[in-house]
Amino acid sequence: MTAAHAVEAVRRAEQAADPDLAARPAGQDGPLMLRAAAGIAAVVASEVRRRRGRLYGARVVLLVGSGSNGGDALHAGARLAAGGAQVVALLSGSRAHAGGLAALRAAGGRVLDDDDAGPTRAALAAPSVLSAADVVVDGLLGIGGRPGLPPAAAALVAAVPPSALVVAVDVPSGVAADSGDLPRDPSGRPACVHADLTVTVGTAKPALLLPPAARAAGRIVVVDIGLDPAVLGPAAVEELDPEQAALLWPVPGPDDDKYSRGVLGVVAGGDTYTGAALLCTTAAVLAGAGMVRYVGPPRPTDLVRQRLPEVVPGPGRVQAWAVGSGVDPDDDAQAAPVTRALAAAADDGVPSLLDAGALPGLAARVRGRGPLDPRRSAVLLTPHAGELARLLTDLGVEADGEPVERAAVEQRPLEHARAAARATGAVVLLKGSTTLVVTPGGRVRAQTDGPGWLGTAGAGDVLAGIAGTLLAAGLAPFDAGALATAVHGRAAAAASAGGPLHAEAVAQAVPGVVAHLLTRREWPS
C-alpha cells in the first residue's frame, strides 16, 4: 500500500531522525538532506541512462529555490555532475542553500547566479539554458511552500521545454502538499510544475495521490531516508497496491455456495435508462456475486433476463443492495424499491451502495432524521462531482455561503467529499480521474487506475455492480469502494488496450483482471 503522510507528521519524523535539525543554521548540510540527495541523484541517473544510454554528457538543469528543497536539488546535482553530467543551477530567490551551492561548484557544476541580481540573470538565461536540457530538476518549493508559484519561479517554469524530462523533488512546486489543491494563475492555468517523475523523500505526500494535484506529479518514487514509521503515524492518504488488493478480494472456498458468497440486490435503470440495469447486473455477475437479484419495471427486467438468465428477477433476501444507477428520481416505478432499499440500509443495517437516483432520497432522510450511524449502517455513496454538488446542496452544506457548484467540487474534491461523509455518516466514493474514498472518520484512499477512455457513459453503472458485489461478500464500504475502483480501472485499461472502449467491455474484462491479480499479485501490464 502506498501511504502518504501530512506535512506535520513528516516534520515530526524528520526531527526525531535528526535531533539537531531545528538548531542547525540555514544552509548547513544535515544527514537527512544528504541521504535525500543521494536517492534523488540515483533515480535521476537511472532514468537518464534508461533514456539516453549513459549519464556522461547529459544536460541537467536545476531550478533552485531558497529552502531545503533547493538544497536537496543542489546536492543531487553535485552527485550527477561528479558522474559526468553537465549541471547548471538556475536560482529563484535571493538565497540558496550554501552547502548545496558549494557542493555543486566543487563537482564542476555551474550556478546562474547567486548574487543580488541572480534571479534576474537566471530568468534571462533560462530560455537558452533550458532549451538544451535533457533533464530539469524542480527544487523550487517544498512541502512548506505556499501553493502557487512566485513570479520569478513561474518565469523559470514557463521556459521549460516540452521535450525535457521534468523531475520534481518531494512535490511538484506550487501544489498544496496536504490537500492536493492546485492553485491557478490569472489565466486559469494550473500555477505549478507538471512533472514526469516525482522523487519524494521519506514518505509520499498527500498531494501526490490526491486530485487535482496528482495529475501534476507523474510517476512517484519514494526515497528512504530513515524516518521512523512509528513516529510518522497513520497515513493521511492511502492507495491500494496489488498485493493489498489481492488480499482483500473475496475468494470462495470449497464449502461456499451462492448464498455464502453473497446475494446482491440491484435497483438500477428503468424504462428510460435500460442500459444501467444491464451494465450493473452484468458487472455484478462477472465480479463474482453468488447471486444477483434485479428489481425493476417489466421492460428492463425482460432485457436483463434475456442477457443474463442467472439473474433472479424481483425482490427477496439479499446480503447487500446496489441502488440508484441510472434511476430517474422522478421514476414512479422505481420509487418504491429505492425507498425500501434506503430503509434497509439506514434502519436494518443492510450494506448498501447508493448511486445517482438514490442520493436525493438519502438527502431527504438525513434532513429529517440526521446522519446515518456508521456503527449500525454500512453505506457507500458513489457520486460524480455534479451529483456530489447536488447532494451537498440538498443537505444544506454551503461553500463560502453559497450553494456548492460542480466546479467547486472539482477544484477541492477532498474538502467536499469529507463534508459529504460527515453530513451523511456514509463512506463517500467521489468518482473522477483520481477517485477518492472517504470515511466519516477521516480515512482517505485515492485510486488512479483507469485510462482517460474510462470517462464514458455507463462506466459508473459497472463500478456500482463491482462494488455492490464486494459489499455482499462482506467487505466494509471503505475497502469495497477502493478495491472496486482499482479493479474497475484496471479492467478499463485491459479493455481499452490504448484505444476507445465501451462500458460493457469493462465489465467483461473484470474476470481476467481479478484472475491475474489473484495468481500473480500484480496488475496486468
Image (cartoon, helix red, strand yellow):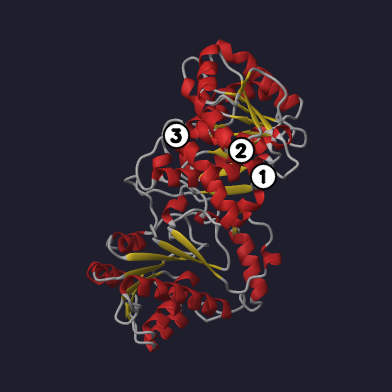
The residue where tag 1 is placed is 250
At 73% from the left and 29% from the top, the residue drawn is 350
Q: Assess disc 1: are there few (<14), some (14-19) or many (≥20) residues with their C-alpha within 10 Å of its C-alpha.
A: some
The picture places residue 23, in percent across and down from the top left corner, at: 62, 77
Helix, strand or loop status at disc 3: helix
In the picture, residue 311 is in which quadrant? top right
Q: Is residue 519 above or below residue 270?
A: below
Q: Which mark is residue 503?
A: 3
- Residue type marked 1: Pro
Q: Is residue 270 above or below residue 151?
A: above
Seen as rendered, the residue at the extreme front is: 254
Q: Earlier in the sequence, mark 2 or mark 1?
A: 1
The picture places residue 64, in percent across and down from the top left corner, at: 39, 71
Seen as rendered, the residue at the extreme bottom is: 106
Helix, strand or loop status at disc 2: loop
For the residue pair 284 and 399, the one nearer the viewer reads as 284
